[in-house]
Image: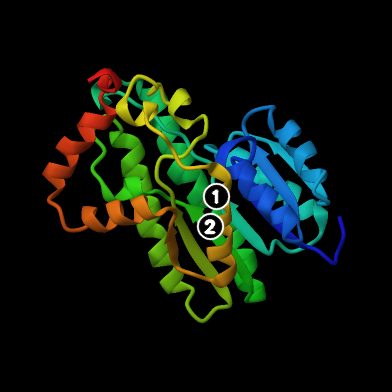
Amino acid sequence: MSVSRQLAIVTGASSGIGRELAKVCAREGFDLVIAADEPEIEAAAEEIRALGAAVETVLADLSTIEGVDRLVEAANRIGRPVDALLANAGRGLGHGFLDQDFPQARHVIDTNITGTVYLVHRIGNDMRRRNAGRIMIVGSIAGYVPGSFQAVYSGTKAFLDSFSFALREELRGSGITVTCLMPGATQTKFHERAGMLDTGVGAAKKDNAADVARTGFDAMMRGDSDIVSGFKNRLQSAVAQVIPAGFLARQHRKYAEPGSARS
């Protein structure tokens, strides 16, 4: 890896927004450590290396302390400071909460919250010792809405949105910026993996992952506190903050309940 380039960690980089974030980083002068829990991370690395970046891959389950430690140790072996952490790894799960397999629901919580918070804690402390660094946490506009038939996922994103704002304030004046990227429904493998292809949101047209990634990266580099990608999503997030939660939950049911794509 070239010491003339900055170093970024991108999690969940095997596909979707994470892969696109890693590609933007490569184009903008970052070498990378990319991580995911699936072997497709190697194909992603080859694509990113073609953009001129040096890339280290880590195959690890980032819902676990051990997986996060493996990622941090891989970054430490490079011997260079992490200039940017893009914490994107996440999981979703559809269907009613009581119908879900609880280990799968817990995996969503552990990936989206526990693994993310632990990774930010480890890398964030290294950044604080240098008084420099950029952190992006990928939340969601779903964090503004009680997500019926996505109750666990939406709850985790509400946590991440809130955590990002709070952490940013704690680090104000430290030389470290925290940016929360809040996408809406995006064209990735998310809805397929979450078992939501028969839902209204699963069948609907979605935002382009590359556009979302570019929006988020630019916001991170500006040091913005947060960014909602896409005009429609910005409008939805603004409206969600003034409409009663019970009404929002009923409306969400229309798009996320199994079979809603046919109604």
Please tell me whether residue 140 is drawn above or below residue 258 in the rendered image. below
Quarter of the image where the N terminus is located: bottom right
**Residues at badges 2 and 1 in contact (C-beta under 8 Å)?**
yes
Rendered image quadrant of residue 38: top right
Identify which residue, 165 or 236, lies in the foreground: 236
Q: Residue at x 81, y 59 (%)?
A: 79
Q: Is residue 11 visible?
A: no
- Determine crowd level at label 2: few under 14, some 14-19, many 20+ residues with C-alpha closer than 10 A: some
- Horizontal and vertical percent position of residue 259: 27, 18
What number is the disc on residue 215? 2
Q: Residue at x 28, y 20 (%)?
A: 258
What number is the disc on residue 167? none
Q: Residue at x 51, y 81 (%)?
A: 173
Measure the C-alpha gap from mark 2 to mark 1.
Answer: 6 Å
Quarter of the image where the C terminus is located: top left
What number is the disc on residue 211? 1
The amino acid type, in three-letter code, at marker 1 is Asp
Left or right: residue 8 versus residue 101 is: right
